[in-house]
Structure formats: C-alpha cells, structure tokens
Image: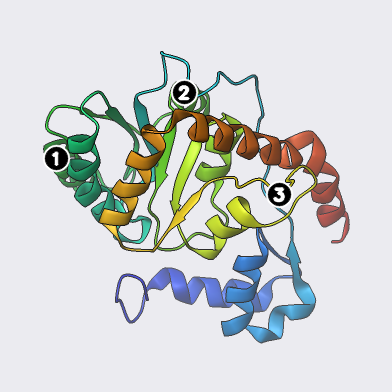
Amino acid sequence: RLRDVAHTLSATAQAEALVEADLVHVPSEAAAAQLLRYYPEIAGRLRVVPLGVAVTKATPVTSPERAHTIITVGRFDHAKGTADLVAALPLLLAALPDAVARVVGGVPDNPRSERRWRARIEAAGGGRVQCLGWLAPSAVMAELAGAAIGLFPSHAETFGLAVLEAMASGVAVVASDVPGHRALLTAGGPNSGSAPRGVLVPVGSPPALGDAVVALALNPTHASALGASGRSFAASLAWPQIWPQWQALLAGL
C-alpha cells in the first residue's frame, strides 16, 4: 500500500505463513494492531515481544567530537522516507553551516537502486553529506556514538530498531510520527520517567524534519537532555532485560 502496488509475491507468502503458523511474533503493539486489522483470525496465536538493544557507555551530545554531526540509519526506500531525507538535507544544512551529515544504509539486494539513491542524497548535501553504505552492526553503533542528532523519516515501522539503537547511544532523535516511533519516544517503560525522549514530526514533511533538527542543533542542552532520557529508556530494552520474554515466547511452542 505504501508503494501503491496492488499485489506482491511477498504479501501472498505472508498470508500463507500467517495461516500455517503455530505462533506469530511481532515486535510491537503497533505492529500487532496493524496485523490484526487485516488478519483478525490470528489473534489467539499472536505474541508481542520487543527487540533488544546493546546499551554501552555514551558520550554527551554536547561534546565537541559529536556536537555537529547528524546521522540517519536505514534502508533507502520511499517507505523509509528517503525522499523526505533528500528534501530535508539542503534545508537543515543551510541553517547549520558547521553541521555534517552521515548516512548509513543502502539497498543491499539492489545495487542499481542504491546508486541512484546515493547520488540523490550526496547531491542534496552539497559536499557535506557522506554516504557510508550498509555497515555491520558494530560499525553502525560506532557511527551512532559519534553523532549528536539522529534523523529517521520512515513512513511506516513495525518497531523502529534504528531509533532504539540511536537512543541507546545517547543520540537526540528526530523521527516521523508513526506508531512504531511513537511507542519508543512517548510511551511508558520501566525507566521512562516523564521526560520527553525525542521529537516527533509529521510524516512526509521535509520542512518539519529540517526545522526539528535545526532547533535541536541550536539548543545542545536540550539535545543532550533528550539523548540522556532516550538512553535511560533504551536500558529497559537492553537484551539482558528482555531475553526472558524471548525464552517464554519460544517455550510457548
């Protein structure tokens, strides 16, 4: 639906798998609600268990080595908001002359598509954007540890793992207001407290994305506070905390 395609082989395979499965796992309540909307018959077999994240020591976003770095992580795709990223980059970079952007991701199964997206992204950045390609998880975490602000413009997310990984690294997050992101940035949790954990902007609005990033970059104290709040929440989804839920999920079979 996001791509305005009437039928795909993967959608047919998904429907068959849902019918045949003994248990259906999804990583968020938002994903469960969406799935039940179209497949209500799986309600008795549906289980929600979140994904986990590694939480390591984080450098404050106000530190000189990361204060001017903006990062985005994800697959290049219209559903992931890559076109919105392309449109937002010139706006935010023009307002932040000292900022640089680092783009982690690509299209691993379609090199031609990846090259097209990469050309668009780099052209939008005017020499201040570096596309790093599809990196190993450890390299992604290293990149996040060196960034102050994370930009995540997806039009849909089943969970928002890239956002959670950014939060775990103390990055101040700007994300599109989709259910997966909203649950991470606004919902409760064992370590959530009442402090905001990120900035949500309307889906499909490059000016809103740019404005939110600029506002955070010009207020590093607020950005650092968001990063600290997000990291505290991410600790509630650290693998040691949620692994028992996965054990119970598998034992349920």
Nearer mark to the viewer, of 1 and 3: 3
Q: In which quarter of the view is residue 187 placed?
A: bottom right
User: Which residue was labeled with disc 3?
Assistant: 194
| Amino acid residing under circle 2 | Ala
| Local SS, label 1 | helix
Q: Quick one: label 2, few (<14), some, or many (20+) residues within 10 Å?
A: few
Left or right relative to 111: residue 194:
right
| Amino acid residing under circle 3 | Ser
User: Which residue was labeled with disc 2?
Assistant: 139
Q: How is the image coloured?
A: rainbow
Dot 2 or dot 3: first in sequence order is: 2
**Which quarter of the rendering shows the C terminus?**
bottom right
In the displayed structure, 180 sits above or below 212; it is: below
Dot 2 or dot 1: first in sequence order is: 1
Residue depicted at 41% across the width and 38% down the height: 216
| Local SS, label 3 | loop
Q: Quick check: can you spot residue 132?
A: no
Residue depicted at 77% across the width and 73% down the height: 45
